[in-house]
Image (cartoon, helix red, strand yellow):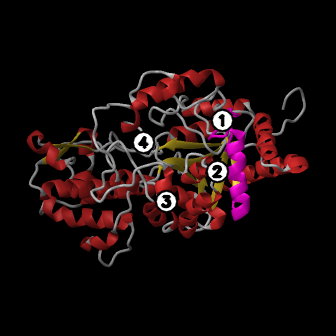
Amino acid sequence: MRGGAITLPDPFVHLKVASGYSLQYGASHPHVLVERAVEQEMDTLALTDRDGTYGAVRFAKACLQGGVRPVLGVDLAVAPLHPWSGLEQPSASGSSRTRTPARGGAFRDRRLPRVTFLAGSRRGWASLCRLVSATHLAGERGEPVSTLDLVAEHVTGSAGRGDVVVLLGPGSELGRAATLRRDDLAHAALAPWLEVVDRADLLVELVSHRLPGSGPGSSPHAARMAAVARATGLGTVLTNAVRYADRLDAPTVDVLDAARRLVPLDLRHVDRGNAEGFLKSGKQMAEVAEEVCRYAGLGSDSTREARRLLAHTRAVGDRCALDPRTDLGLGEVHFPEFDFRRDSVAAGRHRTADGVLRARCEAAVGHRYGNAPRQRIWKRLDDELQTIGSLGYAPYFLTVADVTDLIKDMGVRCAARGSGAGSLVNYLLGVSGVDPLRHDLLMSRFLSPLRRALPDIDVDVESARRLEVY
């Protein structure tokens, strides 16, 4: 509200934004991008960092603080499927390059086709994380390259319809076909994606930085991509391929481009042709939309089509907006999922983490204390288990116990240190070798209902074999 008048949020949603967590590519930190969006009165903003989701948590926290709905995604290089994309096809050995004396340029950056993936739900976000992990494991270190097979396995295979949205932009093979002005190649580029991605989840991304000519980043190029989408019945969205929050930050990405490619800082080696790749306002993006539709030859319908393009972009943003708390679990403590079927001690009991923890502790009392009086032991054990259960930390203790058991099975000595040695539960699980009852150690120094922070259980291993454990 300004001056007593209610102001509506800017309806435009930036669906492709790179932050400084895109290594040597993005120029602005996530919180700076969110602050810029708040200044523009936007209520939704995406983060699609290159090759990973490294800035997602900081971005989601900044969105939570700024009252902005986060849209999370990733921008991945995808192995080319067609020889006309201008790239070498991978050989049988998996290597597509021959080493030359060159140290920079094309050897450092092959400019592979790139595709943007947006999470449309909590399950979609989990699928994207699995896709990123699989991509890094499959490719060379430092150069993750995904494939359509990985997309089919981890995105369309594990996620349901609508959980992941795929954007084919000017950097994809579809965009390269539009650069060549070949509609037949554009249809050939779309065909493999339509086989693995539902038509409703496959969108064409239009980008115009109002560059001169008709190449990627120009309005004529975006218009040609819009024409291909219209001919194939695919939806379109408008993005600005944001790399920096403010126009004044544009020179920074020139330095990043040169550093990424190990080439001199020169106009020949930078990606941008102007300073339009910043976080624009909705009004500025509306002007871009009208220009793209005008170049598409829509004539008097260009204004109406521009509104339709912006409305569809907004609809995709609403569809992919996540809740930082319910969808991402911010502010919650997450534990590994414990497989209770493996625990024979818990046979016959309720298959819960609390039940398994109590069963394992009770089974170890005889081993630890022999024929010693039980009253004090049971009282201390009940008190500790009640505290652990009220905080929901039973899976945490079971996980640490599993880790220490694995270390001991390797024949490596280990021992808990610090306040964790004051817990009878740790002693009975074998995590600690110190009897807290014998030495009058207090559990409250380690864990208390008054302090809901997750307690640290520090485990030391013998230094000579530490790397084996790691």
Circle nearer the N terminus (4, 3): 4
Q: Nearer the viewer, residue 222 or 440?
A: 222
Residue 17 in the figure: left or right of residue 21: right
- Which residue type does callout 4 highlight? Arg
Residue at which label 1 appears: 66
Q: Magenta segment, which residues?
A: 207-235
- Name the quarter where the N terminus is drawn: top right
Residue 331 spot, x, y in % from top left: 52, 45
First in sequence: mark 4 vs mark 2: 4
For label 4, the residue is: 110
The answer to whether residue 195 is left or right of residue 404 is: right
Q: Nearer the viewer, mark 4 or mark 3?
A: 4
Q: Are there few (<14), some (14-19), or many (20+) residues within 10 Å of tag 2?
A: some
Query: Where is mark 3, residue-wise?
Result: 127
Q: Are marks 4 and 3 in contact (CB under 8 Å)?
A: no
Which residue occupies 27% across, 57% down?
Answer: 93
Give the mark, 3 or 2, whose residue is nearer the N terminus.
3
Query: In the image, residue 243 lies at what x, y percent?
Result: 58, 33
* Residue where numbered disc 2 is placed: 181
- Which of 335/39 is in front? 39
Name which residue lies at 11% across and 42% down.
462
Disc 4 from disc 3: Cα separation: 27 Å
Looking at the rendered structure, the kind of residue marked 3 is Ser
| Residue 318 seen anywhere in this rendered image of the structure | no
Earlier along the polypeptide chain: callout 4 or callout 1?
A: 1
Task: Tell me which amino acid carries mark 1.
Answer: Gly
Whether tag 2 and tag 1 are in contact, CB under 8 A, the answer is no
Q: Nearer the viewer, mark 3 or mark 1?
A: 3
Looking at marks 3 and 1 on the same chain, the residue that comes earlier in the sequence is marked by 1
